[in-house]
Image: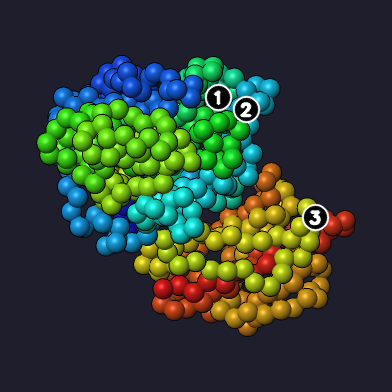
Amino acid sequence: MNRRFSRSLGLALTGALAAIPASAQNGIPSPQPFTPSAQNVAPGPHGYIRCLTPEVDLAFARSLPPSDCSANATNPAAQYSPANLDEVEILVVFHVIRQNSGGGNVPDSRINSQIDILNEDFGALAGTPGSQGVDTKIRFRLASVDPSGQPTTGIVRYNNSSWYQDNGAYYNTIAWDPDVYMNVYTMGLPGGSSSTLGYVPFLPQTGGGNVGGNSDRVVILNSSVGRNAPIQTYNQGRTTTHEVGHYLGLYHTFQNGCSGSNCNTSGDRICDTNSESQPEFNCPGNSSSCGSSDPVRNYMNYSPDTCMSNFTEQQSRRMRCTLEFYRPTIAQPVGPILGENYCVGVTNSTGVGGTLFGAGTKFIANNDFTLTATSVPANTFGLFVVSDTQGFVPSVPNSQGIVCLGGATGRYNSQLGNSGPFGVIPLTVDLTAVPTANGPANTLPGQTWNFQCWYRDSNPTPTSNFTDGYTITFL
Ligand SMILES: [Zn+2]
């Protein structure tokens, strides 16, 4: 499913849910219709409020449209088994909210390790603690392109002591389109020594019009992010795994205690997690609170991070169903690598060579491919050139760069770009009109185009340079 198509599906779904009362569309903390349970708001024995994701008001949930993974029930049909589905990927942006002083930072290294942990846990990666679980075939990757099409690390930092305490609708200012990105916010979170570890404001099943809205988010205590995080007990990244489980529609394993006879319509709506009367805070625990062993090692329990090791098959099916019904735009099939860089971008006045970055799809029918020249000097102009042939010409008059194209070269004369303050030049590639020596050409399946960007520079005297080459074969 391509992004444009799936996004229109998402809009249609959002419209269908728009009948939910506005009072249901607020984020946490919101007294109605969500009521955090006593289990949720009491600090655990290790001093932290484990999770502030609100309990679902079931009377409210029953008023919502049915699905195979509603707030009320899970249909664990085989069609939702990851074994029968493609691998999909969710793009992640980490908003690191710090105090005005800059305190409360989370370094890139821990955020990168948190992405690794998500992929280990959701992928049941061999050789990791998550290997005991089921591979959901859901993957996570830090965004490499921001909402304006610019290259990014997927990590953004802000200094704001009010936001740092989870005050104010900061997400209305800084969220990246939540239909496209999973927005994760790290902060101090209030509570002092009984600080909250994390929450999502709603399960997507009960979020109504807020799903895909700015308040749609995952909030994590900064000191619990990543591998070997600074706090005790909750320091191996499982707070994020747990909250992303909620983000994808899972209940706590101890939801509604032992009650209910049909495990797909009571408790956590999952049959292969034994019910339990209360959250498990210790490990191994080995308790049997409802006549069967408690799912101590499940990510949706409250166990210490080192104890957690699995999502079950039915949890995986509920998450895949949730993506289909409630978050149809957020996860995209993991396709083949788009294209690749080749040749050399010679060092320019910025101290590095310019390079090209491709985004979109390689499917001609989608006609959705963009190139961005990065690491070029600021506020200069350049233009893109294209050819079906690669080349290597190191000595070009009036230029310090290398021409990486051969044969007849086409120019994007109508898309002269200015690199602006960040030294990037974007190009939207219209696959129905690629410039060639013989005029605009259609792109055929299996056709390879090679691109390069020429740009002006002063290094130290006026000159020009080229980025490296980018080659891509369209399908
Ligand atoms: Zn939770």
Image label count: 3
Which dot, 1 or 3, sits closer to the camera? 1
Question: On the rendered structure, is 327 left or right of 342?
Answer: left
Question: On the rendered structure, is 441 left or right of 398?
Answer: left
Q: Compare residues 270 and 321 and report the one nearer the observer.
A: 270
Disc 2 secondary structure class: loop
**Type of the residue with mark 3:** Gly
Which dot, 2 or 3, sits closer to the camera? 2
Residue depicted at x 20% and y 31%: 258
Q: Position of residue 94 (x, y in %)?
A: 53, 39
Which colour style is shown?
rainbow
Q: Is residue 190 above or below residue 204?
A: above
Q: Which mark is residue 188?
A: 1
Q: Which residue is mark 2?
A: 104
* Discs 1, 2 touching: Cβ within 8 Å: yes
Precedes in sequence: disc 1 or disc 2: 2
Q: Which residue is mark 3?
A: 351
Disc 3 secondary structure class: loop
